[in-house]
Amino acid sequence: MARSETALTREEMMHFRTQGYLGPYPLCSAAEMAALRPAIEQVLETDPPDSKNRVHNRHLDSRVIYDLATHPEILNRMVNLYGTDLLLWRTNFFVKYKGTRAIPWHQDFNYWPLEPPIIVSAWIAIDASTKENGNLQLIPGSHRKIIPHVKATPDVQFQEMADAGYYDPDQLIDLEMQPGEFILFNERTLHHSKANNSNLRRIGLAVRAIIPIVNVLKYDSKDHGLQVIHGEDAMGFNRLTSPPKKADRG
């Protein structure tokens, strides 16, 4: 995959501050992602060391996923927005086959054991992400207020969802992406995705990075630790771990 130094313009940085997201940007070409996809699929078909969840935190045991999550096209933009010191907290695969339920409107920080909740997320399209197979949708500028969350309806995946009385879904934008593209957004940007009613699978990888002043209040497992992916961790609040060895092929 191509590697390049990436600096955001003043206009891009202002867009992130006012709208709550940036992108899509190319991480790699569709052909390069196609070449990488079998290794990603192999990861998703195997159990992690803790045998808990095949789609959660696979950057901890797979170098393929770690390298994807920390690709310079992502990392350099995160540094532009959040400063030179970054820790990788979580990664999550979102896999949608035909019939997979919708993900409700939500602000990510509502669910997360972090204090203060300052997170930058990247969402990488492993497969094409389209209106037909349940692409990501978000509401620009929605990060500027906290939206109450209520018990979710049975037709969606999460247990809580944003209260529909506090946002206007007509303001949404569709973020269709080709394989190898990604977006960035923050912890309060309101987003969701519809059910996949097509025959086309949709895999996305979400990458969650924090700055060192953020304290993780609850870890995902006894083996869960954070990796310094840029700069240093001068605060020492959180449990750290090393990246997977380069010899790991996923």
Image (cartoon, rainbow, N blue to C red):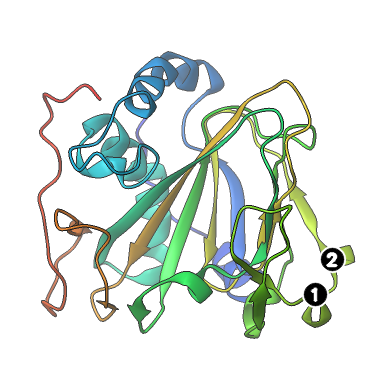
Q: Residue furthest front?
A: 154
Say which of 104 and 34 sits in front: 104
Amino acid at circle 1: Ala
Q: Which residue in the protein does label 1 denote?
A: 164
**Which is more N-terminal, label 1 or label 2?**
1
Q: How many numbered circles does the render carry? A: 2
Say which of 162 and 169 sits in front: 162
Task: Give me the disc on residue 169.
Answer: 2
Residue 154, above or below 167: above
Rendered location of residue 110, percent (x, y): 52, 75
- In the image, taking residue 234 as reference, residue 166 lies left or right, namely right
Query: Measuring 74% from the left and 77% from the top, which residue is drawn there?
Result: 163
Q: Secondary structure at mark 1?
A: helix
Q: Give how far apart the Cα atoms at labels 2 and 1 are.
A: 8 Å
Amino acid at circle 2: Pro
Residue 63 occupies quadrant: top left
Quadrant for the C terminus, please: top left
Q: Are marks 2 and 1 in contact (CB under 8 Å)?
A: yes
Q: Secondary structure at mark 2?
A: helix
Say which of 74 and 250 sits in front: 250
Residue 172 occupies quadrant: bottom right
Rendered location of residue 27, percent (x, y): 47, 36
Query: Measuring 35% from the left and 43% from the top, which residue is drawn there?
Result: 69
Task: Give me the disc on residue 44.
Answer: none
- In the image, taking residue 150 as reference, residue 113 lies left or right, namely left
| Front: mark 2 or 1 | 1
Query: Measuring 24% from the left and 65% from the top, which residue is drawn there?
Result: 219
